[in-house]
Image (cartoon, rainbow, N blue to C red):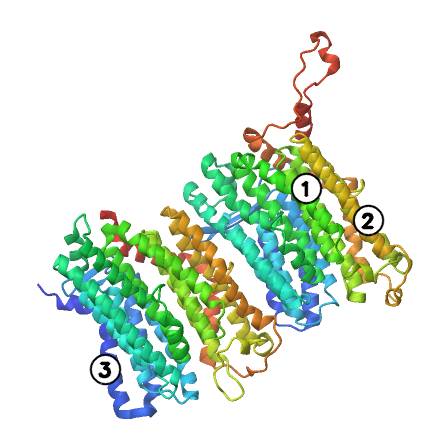
Amino acid sequence: MNDLGFPILSTMLLVPALAAIICLFVSAGTARMIALLATLIDLALGIILWINFDIGGAQWQFVESAPLFDRFSWALGIDGISLMLIMLSVFLMPICIGASWNSIDKRVGEYMAAFLFMEVLMIGVFAAQDIFLFYILFEAGLIPMYLIIGIWGGADRIYASYKFFLYTLLGSVLMLIAMFWMVNEVGTTDIPTLMQYDFAPEAQTWLWLAFFASFAVKMPMWPVHTWLPDAHVQAPTAGSVILAGVLLKLGGYGFIRFSLPMFPEASAQFVWLMLSLSMVAVIYTSLVALVQHDMKKLIAYSSVAHMAIVTVGLFAFNQQGLEGAMIIMLSHGLVSGALFLCVGVIYDRLHTREIDRYGGLSINMPRYALLFLLFTMASIGLPGTSGFVGEFLALLGVYEVSSLVTLVSTTGIILGAGYMLYLYRRIAFGELVHDDVKQMTDLSPREMALLAPIAAVVLWMGVYPESFLAPMRGDISALEARLARAKPVGDAQLTPGTGLPANADTHGNSDNHGSAADEGAH
Amino acid sequence: MPQYELWLQLTAPELILSISSLILLLIAGFAGQKSSKLVGILAVTALVASSAVALDFLTGDGFSEGADAFYGQYFMDRFGSFTKLLIYAAAIITLIISPRFLEERKMMRPEFPVLIVFAAIGMGLMVSATDLISLYIGLELNSLAAYVLASFARDDERSSEAGLKYFVLGALASGILLYGMSLLYGFTGTTSFIGIANAFGDELGNGALFGMVFVLAGLAFKISAVPFHMWTPDVYEGAPTPVTAFFASAPKVAAIALTMRVLFWCFYGFIASWQPIIIFIALGSIIIGAAGAIGQQNVKRLLAYSSINNVGFLLIGIAAASAAGAAATSTYLLIYVAMTLGAFACVMELRDVNGNAVESLDALAGLSKVRPGIAAALAIFMFSLAGIPPLYGFWGKALVFSAAVEAGLLPLAAIGIAASVIGAFYYLKVIKVMYFDDVSGIVVAERSAPERLAIIILTALFVSPLGFFLNGVIATYSDQAGTALTYFLSFA
């Protein structure tokens, strides 16, 4: 149990679960209210969770465990990494409900139920401390997302929903076999114990590959990213928000929770694979994004590019890289979610995602143009926004490992600026040429209420990232310590000088690498 | 020294059913058509009484080690009791969901419950048989009842065709089985499972190996495993839906249990000889069951392929050749029976304006708007059959794969689970048709039959995530069943 006196994590799962069941049986209006209420309660519970999270305290906090299911147990608990991702989920959920308030008018109860069910699963995945519980919640997310895309999606929704479901399912099943092997070997399903267990390096290779199959698809990494643009384009706005905002983080979370701590040797062995796939992804998908005519598709490809920077940071094996990867995940969750909302705003008015059908929106929609600009800049990684912090840290981290990867990734970020600014120019600047675009009204109070909080958090994370880094620092240090034994040799290591012994003090640390690691450890 | 009192006690479930079925036959014969309701109720009562006895054997301490009856012909153990309970439960559910469906089509006759009870006796004998002779008697008793049931809609061409096909092919399979049995008898001089196992000693000669292969081929037909699965779609499509529901549940349990008994008793010393065969038919069933279903337009045919597919997963637990594997297969059987009967009960609910049963997949289009409850239940069963968590069907698959991994069969587990994704495709298709497509207008909204609705709700709740709370109870008894069945493996 915890200091709060009640099992807060289970409560956070129970509230949306009950609300989801109720939503199935009530009218549209009531369902909307119930869904909003439930997600706001969860947001409040999330804030309580954050306030009560003891930074620098025990690694696993708010731990609950009940051996309910014979072979595995209802074990929940969070560390700083989980906390931040749970916060992201509970923060985005009320916004998703708000975004669907008017645009969803058929089967509202079922829609809200699917979203609430989704919330249960997302919080559950980040809080699960039992490997089978994790798998069940991880996989279960396919069902509501399949229905959300398939029932409320666009014209080509059926193809997209199948592709989403089968792609991610195929990726995940091998992970289950690997989990059975691990549980059989270690004799426990407890994730913290498994994270400390040293598997034989030969076994690690296979286990790592099985987990990789799952997380690479979820992430998504090139070349298994192709489900993402289809899913995004066809999903309703809120579906895209949750897909980009939280579901894509499952892959990164999987790497940081399973692949890296459980199989350090194998992770080191496959650094080349991760880095080269990421390099291809960051350049290739950025170029693809440049030529898109569909706004959602463009943002979807940009997500793949951003996620590639995450994998680059994760597999840098050092504090900055890991912290940077986490901040990019949080930042991308907010920013891409906000960008999809921005697309949704104008889609609701004109019912097209064709970029060329817009133009000059800064004239008649100034508030919209302002917020859209902020999120565009955050996506590019302008200093002062959340995107900058993450990308800077991640690139700093990987610079220790490989200058080439850093060079390529940075090029990708420049390309990112290219496609985002080009998108913004075509939508917001220029003359108002289309008559129907002239008729479009600026943001309604509801839409402002959805976008403003995200804008505030994006700036907060950009200006004072310490709030978000502090809870995770201890866990990332622990992870770095665990990875230390397998850390690959980077190309940026300076050879210790054989210079003048007398002047050694004035030159200070000739070993830059060592000092960077020390600083990182704080 | 005959101990008739004990033997009669051990065979009580079959005895109760045998005596009741004869009485029911008399009632049916003398009272005729109008007695069908009464016969149905009495049949359910008899099955409940037998289940109570089987439950007592399973949970009580009286025969925890199992006991032999009739000089090695019959062995009452926890595995037999566990599967018998499943068989009786499936028969009871069939008898609950069927009458209204049959009455509406003027097909309800008192013989229907009697035949189900006959089949149940045969199946009870199958799962407890420890001798080739009692095995064959049980198998044929079940099969003969099943042939008649398949053609129960005697005015319907498809049903007659199903019955005939089932009979001809079933007879062929029985012939193959008998041939295998005769080889085994010829090489060992005994028909008792344990006698056969002991007679082999350390080496399985070529002749005996042939015997084993023929026996397995015959049994593979009965469980409709690839490559002996061809009859399944035709019979499942042609037989009246309640009969199909029955075929897909109880006889599957009995035949799988029988196969396990033969493998773990007769051939416990020769795992290396039969494991490759089981692995082959397991993967074959998974892949062909999944691929064959993709183009199907008839829901019953689709479910037939689904049952072939599921048999593949059940066989993976057997291939593990361990107590854990046997326990996993037992658990999977339980979950499978619930999913299958639930899915068929949903199909029975569907009809068009004229009251005809709707079986085509296209007709299900937009079902979620016309019959939201039935569509939701069917979606739950489909996701569960596909093994998608958090539905309980996942747990059955997880257990068999876990057992395979524990037994070191990693390639089998990896290929099997990857092939399960193919199966997910057509289960998803059913959901797509019901939820994503526009209303077809064929299926009409109407009130559900209350007893059928109750069964649908119960089975849907069971395969919903709530099922996981039963893990402990189910594991207790399926572990005991698995341990009892694989008793001899420790000597291998």
Q: Is residue A244 above or below residue B168?
A: above
Amino acid type at mark 3: Leu
Q: In the drawing, does residue B104 fall left or right of residue B439?
A: left
Q: Residue furthest left?
A: B1
Q: Residues within 10 Å of mark 1 (few under 14, many from 20)?
A: many
Q: Position of residue A278 (x, y in %)?
A: 64, 42
Q: Is residue B491 above or below residue B71?
A: above
Q: Quadrant of residue A30?
A: bottom right
Q: Check if mark 2's residue and mark 1's residue have beta carbons within 8 Å.
A: no
- Residue closer to the observer: B22 or B383: B383
Amino acid type at mark 1: Ile
Q: Nearer the viewer, mark 2 or mark 1?
A: 2
Q: Check if mark 1's residue and mark 3's residue have beta carbons within 8 Å.
A: no
Q: Residue at x 18, y 56 (%)?
A: B207
Q: Measure the alpha-carbon separation of dots 1 and 3.
A: 75 Å
Among numbered discs 2 and 1, the one appearing first in the sequence: 1
- Residue closer to the observer: B490 or A418: A418
Q: Residue at x 33, y 71 (%)?
A: B88
Q: Quadrant of residue B194?
A: bottom left
Q: Position of residue A117 (x, y in %)?
A: 60, 61
Q: Residue at x 40, y 79 (%)?
A: B238
Q: Is residue B45 above or below residue A59?
A: below
Amino acid type at mark 2: Leu
Helix, strand or loop status at disc 2: helix
Residue that mark 3 sits on: B22
Residue that mark 1 sits on: A309
Q: In the drawing, does residue A110 fall left or right of residue B178?
A: right
Please, which chain is the residue tagged with disc 3 on? Answer: B
Residue that mark 2 sits on: A421
